[in-house]
Amino acid sequence: MGHHPQQVPPAALPVDGRGMIGNMRTAALVSLSGAIDFMCFPRIDSPTLFAGLLDRERGGAFAITPRETHANVKQMYLPETNVLLTRFMTGAGVCELLDLMPVKANAEDLPNCVLRIVRLVFGRMTLDVHCDPRFDYARGEHEARAVEKGIGFFRADGAPPVRLLASVPMQIDGRGACATLDFEEGDCACFVLGAGDGLADIEANHDEVLSETLAYWKAWSSHSTYRGRYREVVLRSALTLKMLSSEEFGAIVAAPTFGLPEAQDGSRRWDYRFTWIRDAAFSVYALLRLGYTGEAQRFMKWIAERSRDCSAHGQLRVMYSVDGEDALAEAGLTSLVGETPGQVVIGNEAREQIQLDVYGALLDSVYLYNKYGAAISYDGWRHVTRTVDYVVEHWREADHGIWEFRNGTRALLHSRLMCWVTLDRALRLAEKRSLPAPLARWFETRDEIHREIHEQFWNDDLQSFVQTPGSATLDASTLMMPLVRFIGPQDPHWIGTLDAIGHELRVDPLIFRYTRGSTLDGLPGTEGGFSACSFWYAEALARSGRVDEGRLVFEKMLAYANHVGLFSEEVATSGEALGNFPQALTHLALISAAYQLDRNLDRVHVPWT
């Protein structure tokens, strides 16, 4: 899957030179040099424990690295699991490093931790182990003290300590811990890093814990109903989404990271460790499509709670913390600087924005879940009705939109489109389930939005729909028009738009979010192609009957996955990964496009519904 980096010194590792492990509580990135250099703890949206990915000097990491500087490295997931295997190879020896966060079915008592198992399978090798935590985004103080079977990291603020237990002796090294492994064939060491009771049991029974975790992931993978031509990449996407979901709350975060720049000059660094309502529809669709009704149901329950808690007149937040509380306020960090200029921020200012497209995403997910899952409750429908009525009142307003513009609001096509979806899905649901609703008013509004999109957002010179009325700005979010069934995929207006996007926003398979130009979003730096848009484009081509073209875009995009099949948010024209990593939305768009391509290539005719 993609290229395999060879002999990569830690300093030169690209952002996506990493695999991800997780336990549905938190997640960690493990680099090709054997370092866990990004991990938030104890939750995926908690402050960082390791952030060496952002700042090698100050961020902290837990590295298990061969002393030989020119070891070849291969990294892979054990089949159908989220257990990561990193292999170091030299002329003198071959070493295997297994990384996982223990999980098992019905595991209330399992501690929240990382398990690392190192084995020498051939020859001899010396490895250096360095565990150097930096609490609270590298702002917190702590000291390292010996504890039974390892080292404890005790925090100055009195928060529970994090402990590192090992099957080999560890030494304290400043505020960190270290060890040297002089290994010969057959030697093995194990390390457990985490908090809570039961860490010693995991260290003592690491092989059993490994087996249980493998069994958990294989059982989960076996529930996938997808049997198409892209089984491996679709399953890897599903496994990644599962790691980005919260066992406790049912929410799915957009990415496990923050602060990774979307522009090559180091700017545009946002925090994605939140749940966007917008991603809800994509998530529910993908999970239901793959047969994961349990996950879809838990996410719908989470969404229903947000819908119930929304303001009296039906207005929703754009995004929430994993637990459903308001997302963190945006603030710059001075503790993590990194090599490239551009301030690292935590929290997200978008929480204050108006994004009218979220209602369409909400209603689409409710509709899909009703169609493939369970019928909506009386109270649930009351909350939905309130939200639909809110859209009836407000759909004409300017907003910040799907791309979260930071230089003011405007009348946006994608927001109007998703307001149309809000009414369309509500009407379908009311009719299918014979639910009470002000049907006449809803029908009237739906038709009005439909007319306005065709009349106000069509540019005759470009023969294309445009981002705002009277502009010549193209916008890749327009690709959603046939995907949400607003327009027929063969409609001449749609074909014109598809051609215009292909001509103006495309570089090879990469699709940029909108006509490039620094004034548009009021932000510095030039961003890369937006990976999810490329998969939407591939799907739109396939739906429009240009299946071979769509397939080629799809297959070319697959080559931008990293060595273990994970996708970043964006890709530079030079091919490097940009933005937060891995990104849920990209994997969701991949699943949807794979489904559509299979249907077209198998010549399955799906009637218009």
Image (tube, rainbow, N blue to C red):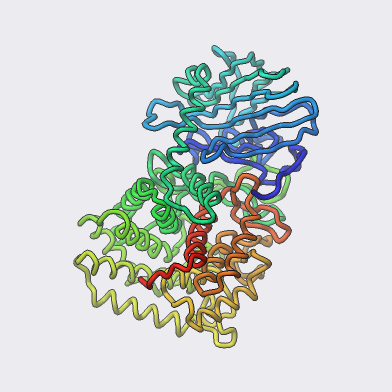
Pinpoint residue 220: horizontal percent, then vertical percent. Answer: 43, 40
Indicate whether 314 appears above or below 239. Answer: below
Pinpoint residue 497: horizontal percent, then vertical percent. Answer: 55, 78
Q: Give the tally of numbered discs.
A: 0
Task: Indicate the quadrant where residue 557 lies.
Answer: bottom right
Indicate whether 31 appears above or below 123. Answer: below
Looking at this view, is 5 or 122 the one in front?
122
Indicate whether 459 appears above or below 95. Answer: below
Task: Indicate the quadrant where residue 124 lies.
Answer: top right
Residue 47 visible within the image: no
Pinpoint residue 204: horizontal percent, then vertical percent. Answer: 51, 16
Indicate whether 418 appears above or below 267. Answer: below
The residue positioned 61% from the left and 56% from the top of the image is 558
The residue positioned 47% from the left and 60% from the top of the image is 353
Pinpoint residue 455: horizontal percent, then vertical percent. Answer: 45, 85
Query: In screen coordinates, is 305 left or right of 81?
Result: left
Looking at this view, is 513 or 270 the one in front?
513
Query: In screen coordinates, is 508 left or right of 597?
Result: right
**Quarter of the C terminus within the rendering:** bottom left
Residue 495 visible within the image: yes
Q: Which residue lies furthest to the top in this view?
A: 148
Query: In screen coordinates, is 311 left or right of 97?
Result: left
Looking at this view, is 609 or 109 the one in front?
609
Query: In screen coordinates, is 508 left or right of 411?
Result: right
Q: Which residue lies furthest to the front in this view?
A: 602
